[in-house]
Image (cartoon, rainbow, N blue to C red):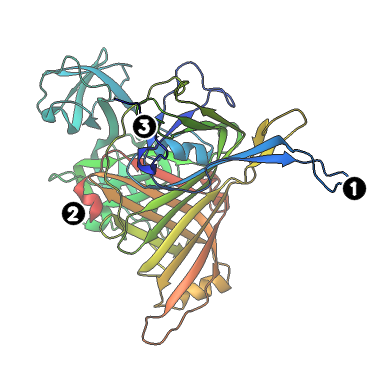
Amino acid sequence: MADCINEKIDSNVTELRIAEEECLRELGDAPVWVPRDPNSYGSFGATFNRITRAPISRGRQRRKGKIVGLDSDAAFNADLTASALREDLQGFMFADLRVKGVSRASEVTPSGVTLVNGDAIPVGSLVALSGFAATSNRGLRTVTTNAAGVVSVSGTLVAEPNPPAGAAVSVVGAVAGAVSVVTPAGGYPRLVSESFDFTTLGLVPGEWVCVGGDAAGTYFADAMNNGFKRVRSVRADELVFDKSHGVMKAEGEVASLHIYTGHHLRNETGNLIKRRTYQLERALGSLDGLEPGQYEYITGAVPNEFNVSLTEEDKITADLSYVGTGYETRTQAEGPKEGARPALIDEDVYNTTSDVVAMNLTILNPGDASPSPLFGYATDVSIGISNGVTRNKAIGVMGAFDATAGDFVVTGNVTAYFSDIAAVRAIERNADVSFDMALVLDNKGVIFDIPLLSLGDGRINVTKDEPIMLPVSLEAGSGAKIDSALNYTLGLQFFDYLPMRATA
């Protein structure tokens, strides 16, 4: 049979992966090429810059040009899922994810789970078991003992001497005993306890928690005392909230209250700022239809812009763009760069109909954790990050030798149904405003939180036979004006497990 050569390559044979660099344009010894499933591409690849001699001459002809530089970029649109973009967002936020505790598992016996790193997970912690082969070894559990790296948990376990590589035990909260709600006059609502130490939750101001479990005795009787709350301050005997999805009321003790926590990500300050650079690998198929195929690489890529968009009756998507400092290609004979290439994790995408459980744009009022929102419903919402990344070029360098980040800027837009002039008044008076949005799907979730912003636009749109609409632009600033502990512009909270109560 004759060897056939492809005269074209279809887009559906391409594949996108991303790996974090150890140093700029250097992958390190064991890179991991994490798969991404883009819906579409924006600018992706390199533009080559050329010079051409054009002397004054009777022949009126130019000389052959020469390539002297290049500009590389990568941009793509992807669906927003529970974990697919979590690692990417660390790059765009120039920060490390503040992880509550995730331990890999090396063995399961009926009496407990052996942890690879032997983390000391406190007794009474709520943990989520995931990635195990046996169904009975998954789901929400309570830690009953922890000794010598072996964690015993509530419920039934079956033996798994060699669990899958992704099997893990994640801390998702705690069972807090004898907790009550206090709502002081003129002050923020709070949880108080004489027997439970709230500092063991590992929370910092600005983090979100979900109060209340699903089982009887794990939640407050007043529904508004449960659900999502933002932490303002933490003491051993007291947890104060400055945001609550529901007006909290005083209530007596719950003996086994569940408090769910997540992994926190915010733009950091000082030495907590961390720049990450990446290489993006795009497989381009092969000439004969066989592996490994041809590849292109955006190298020394710095995360620049991230935009999440919500429209009615649709999935939630994000646009990501990177500014590259270099560009490489690999032929089929050369094959891809070395490194591990794990399989894509199949997850459902968040949608705007059933998965947006809360969205609040409110005027800040000291001591009030639940002010009235400025709108009831919206048709379009977008939140964007921009790092203002520019390339650093120099004599003797093809491409760029580095890149410089500008200010961390967060902006957004909301198109809402008009019902109250208060939103226009808030723009007119340059009021201090806050925004938060909670997404929940399959007992996991994420919260977007902007502690302080100003509003713009606000021109009321009146069209015959249609509802009155109000387009509003958002421009965020540091929350330090509210409280020095809230010195960030955008916060994200990723929950590895949430009770069904979180969707209420």
Residue at image coords 42%, 60%: 368
Question: Which residue does the numbered mark 1 point to in the structure image?
Answer: 58
Residue at image coords 27%, 60%: 353
Task: Say if mark 1 contacts mark 3, CB within 8 Å.
Answer: no
Q: Residues within 10 Å of mark 3 (few under 14, many from 20)?
A: some
* Horizontal side of residue 388 vs 170, given as left or right: right
Q: Residue 300 placed where, x, y %?
A: 58, 31
* Horizontal side of residue 13 vs 450, given as left or right: left
Q: Residue 503 placed where, x, y %?
A: 24, 53
Disc 1 or disc 3, which is closer to the eye? Answer: 1
Amino acid beneath label 2: Ala
Residue found at the very far bottom of the displayed protein: 464
| First of labels 2, 3 by sequence position | 3
186 vs 440, nearest the viewer: 440
Amino acid beneath label 1: Arg
Question: Which residue does the numbered mark 3 point to in the structure image?
Answer: 100
Amino acid beneath label 3: Lys
Using the numbered discs, state the Cα–Cα distance from disc 1 to disc 3 in whole angstroms.
74 Å
| First of labels 2, 1 by sequence position | 1
Q: Residue 442 placed where, x, y %?
A: 22, 45
Question: Which residue does the numbered mark 2 point to in the structure image?
Answer: 221
Using the numbered discs, state the Cα–Cα distance from disc 2 to disc 3 in whole angstroms.
28 Å
* Horizontal side of residue 326 vs 458, given as left or right: right
210 vs 272, nearest the viewer: 272
Residue found at the very far front of the displayed protein: 2
From the image, which quarter does the N terminus lie in?
top left
Secondary structure of residue under mark 1: loop
Residue at image coords 52%, 75%: 425
Residue found at the very far top of the displayed protein: 148
